[in-house]
Image: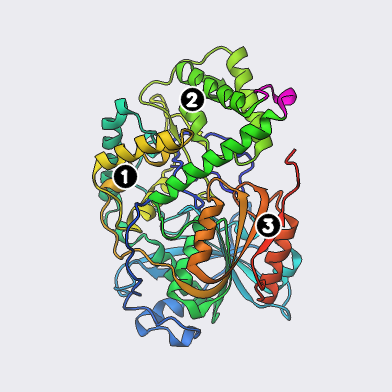
């Protein structure tokens, strides 16, 4: 998959060929199972509030590195500086192979008010984050107190990027269909085999636990005793893992659009399908009340029927829209369509008009349509694509490679039985017609090599602020509440009526939520109890 659209992409509905939808910024599942307790790698210092001086001896060559800051690139603001540091590929063998991490810094605007560093992560897993310090809309109070630190996680972007050599078609998701299931199993096997062949020595170590350890090396190299953190979507899980491994070094942590830490990752995909169905139901009611504007039906049932007729028509005769050839699966795969009811109504009305007035496009050659996923940041946070056999050149596969690498290696609960994926996809297609067959379809994780460590169980009392929109189908409200339950020292801020994936410091955000987030980041004081903000009454 190419990097999926995140909170910071301009057009949520841009379709990118060769992208996979199931990363989540969050992003992009796992089956329910008992999770192993986290065991820090032997070379790591014990978790605590201490700083650089207490780092375990084997890590000193990493924690005492000197950074050489330089301009990030010609397009970046002059104030944003970048540097590279080394971390061990395997923290249990710090004297072994090293990999590079790219980080960025926007220095605090005040030396007297400076509090420390604020690390930023957009989700994914695997979305690059070097530009986040300048992309997010931080208020002046936050900029005065923090050096804003972006970073590309291990294997992503400019941090020793992983490539499996995947073609555009191999980067694409496939909804479950009985007639293509055998080919889809072979697709999943092929992706796993190509990644093993190209990067097999790296795959076991591309896990969230090691990315959290990388964050702690960044902390030490920057000379800080603690770090503060803002992570979106999958970045909320990364932040929670850091809090679990290094509770005494976590200062002010904000987890925006949180995933359920007990359902990483197959359960996360299935939660997306449930969230998308809820958003679709809400959208149908909202649109029906505006039939004179959109012409999609004057009852929710009629709106839904219009949508499914459009899907069926596009599957028979693909629609040319905005220069793209879209099948019904392509349209369904774009589960960002119903992130915002007004934008969704406008898009479906435009697609309906194109189908009625335009010349049907020729059916794509090759196999069925394919798709992408978002993030905030975003999981991760996402749009559909059509994989065609006449594509001249496969796009860069770094995002697909690192996303599958993390999702497959992070947990040992992926089933290796293709028939289980078939059964669950059939079940979830019936439960959640909009996206269930995408969410539960077979993935390369069915054939992936085992990760180097068990999954981290999240269960601690470290303070954190969790922010969540009520109508986020990518990381639904019930997932955020599950994270809140696991982080027993957290408070939760819910934007009732809030749409979209991502709450704080994003375009079109909520001023009440931004104020609450800023108050916590600048004072360290969590609300005494959970907080509710309200979105505008009418998205129109």
Q: CA distance from mark 1 to mark 3?
A: 35 Å
Question: Residue visible at 62% across and 46% down?
Answer: 500
- Foreground pick, 386 / 73: 386
Choose mark 2 or mark 1, whichever is in front.
2
Total number of numbered labels? 3
Identify the residue position indicated by label 2 in the image: 328
Residue 152 visible (yes or no): no
Question: Residue visible at 26% across and 36% down?
Answer: 186
Residue 336 visible (yes or no): yes
Identify the residue position indicated by label 1 in the image: 444
Q: Secondary structure at mark 3?
A: loop
Residue 206 image offset from top left, x and y in percent: 36, 59
Q: Are marks 1 and 3 in contact (CB under 8 Å)?
A: no
Left or right: residue 36 compared with residue 343: left
Question: Residue visible at 50% across and 53% down?
Answer: 26
Choose mark 2 or mark 3, whichever is in front.
2
Q: Quadrant of residue 299?
A: top right
Q: Are marks 2 and 1 in contact (CB under 8 Å)?
A: no
Check the picture and name the quadrant holding the N terminus. Answer: top left
Say if 214 sits above or below 337 in the image.
below
Q: Which callout, 2 or 1, points at the residue further toward the start of the chain?
A: 2
- Residue numbers of the magenta segment: 290-298
Residue 279 image offset from top left, x and y in percent: 58, 40
Residue 453 image offset from top left, x and y in percent: 30, 65
Q: Are marks 2 and 3 in contact (CB under 8 Å)?
A: no
Identify the residue position indicated by label 3 in the image: 505
Q: Secondary structure at mark 2?
A: helix
Q: Secondary structure at mark 1?
A: helix
Q: Which mark is residue 525?
A: none
Q: Quadrant of residue 310?
A: top right
């Amino acid at each position: 998959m190419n990097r999926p659209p995140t909170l910071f992409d301009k057009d949520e509905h841009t379709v990118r060929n060769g992208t996979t939808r199931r990363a989540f910024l969050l992003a992009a599942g796992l089956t329910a199972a008992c999770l192993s307790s986290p065991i820090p790698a032997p070379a790591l210092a014990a978790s605590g509030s201490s700083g650089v001086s207490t780092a375990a001896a084997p890590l000193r060559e990493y924690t005492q590195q000197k950074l050489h800051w330089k301009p990030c690139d010609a397009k970046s603001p002059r104030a944003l500086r970048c540097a590279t540091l080394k971390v061990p590929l395997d923290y249990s063998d710090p004297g072994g192979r090293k990999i590079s991490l790219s980080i960025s810094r926007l220095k605090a605007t005040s030396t007297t008010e400076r509090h420390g560093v604020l690390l930023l992560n957009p989700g994914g897993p695997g979305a690059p984050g070097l530009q986040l310090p300048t992309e997010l809309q931080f208020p002046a109070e936050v900029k005065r107190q923090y050096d804003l630190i972006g970073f590309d996680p291990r294997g992503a972007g400019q941090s020793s990027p992983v490539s499996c050599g995947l073609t555009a078609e191999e980067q694409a998701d496939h909804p479950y269909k009985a007639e293509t299931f055998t080919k889809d199993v072979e697709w999943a096997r092929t992706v796993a085999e190509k990644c093993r062949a190209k990067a097999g020595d790296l795959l076991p170590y591309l896990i969230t636990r090691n990315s959290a350890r990388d964050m702690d090396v960044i902390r030490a190299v920057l000379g800080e005793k603690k770090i503060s953190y803002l992570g979106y979507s999958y970045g909320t899980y990364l932040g929670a893992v850091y809090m679990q491994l290094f509770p005494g070094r976590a200062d002010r942590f904000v987890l925006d659009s949180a995933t359920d830490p007990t359902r990483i990752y197959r359960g996360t995909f299935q939660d997306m399908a449930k969230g998308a169905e809820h958003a679709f139901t809400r959208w149908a009611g909202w649109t029906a009340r505006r039939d004179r504007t959109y012409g999609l039906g004057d009852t929710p049932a009629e709106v839904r029927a219009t949508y499914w007729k459009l899907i069926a028509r596009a599957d028979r005769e693909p629609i040319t829209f905005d220069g793209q050839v879209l099948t019904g699966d392509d349209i369904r795969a774009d589960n960002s369509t119903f992130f915002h009811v007004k934008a969704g109504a406008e898009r479906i009305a435009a697609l309906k008009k194109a189908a009625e007035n335009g010349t049907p496009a020729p059916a794509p050659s090759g196999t069925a349509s394919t798709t992408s996923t978002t993030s905030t940041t975003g999981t991760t946070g996402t749009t559909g694509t059509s994989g065609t056999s006449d594509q001249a050149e496969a796009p860069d596969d770094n995002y697909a490679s690192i996303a599958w690498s993390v999702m497959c290696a992070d947990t040992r609960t992926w089933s290796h039985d293709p028939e289980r994926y078939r059964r669950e996809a059939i079940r979830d297609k019936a439960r959640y017609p909009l996206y269930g067959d995408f969410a539960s379809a077979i993935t390369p994780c069915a054939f992936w090599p085992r990760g180097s460590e068990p999954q981290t169980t999240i269960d601690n009392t470290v303070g954190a602020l969790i922010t969540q929109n009520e109508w986020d189908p990518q990381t639904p409200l019930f997932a955020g509440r599950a994270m809140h339950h696991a982080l027993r020292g957290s408070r939760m801020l819910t934007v009732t009526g809030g749409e979209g994936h991502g709450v704080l410091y994003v375009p079109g955000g909520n001023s009440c939520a931004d104020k609450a987030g800023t108050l916590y980041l600048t004072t360290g004081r969590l609300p005494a109890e959970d907080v509710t903000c309200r979105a505008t009454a009418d998205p129109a």
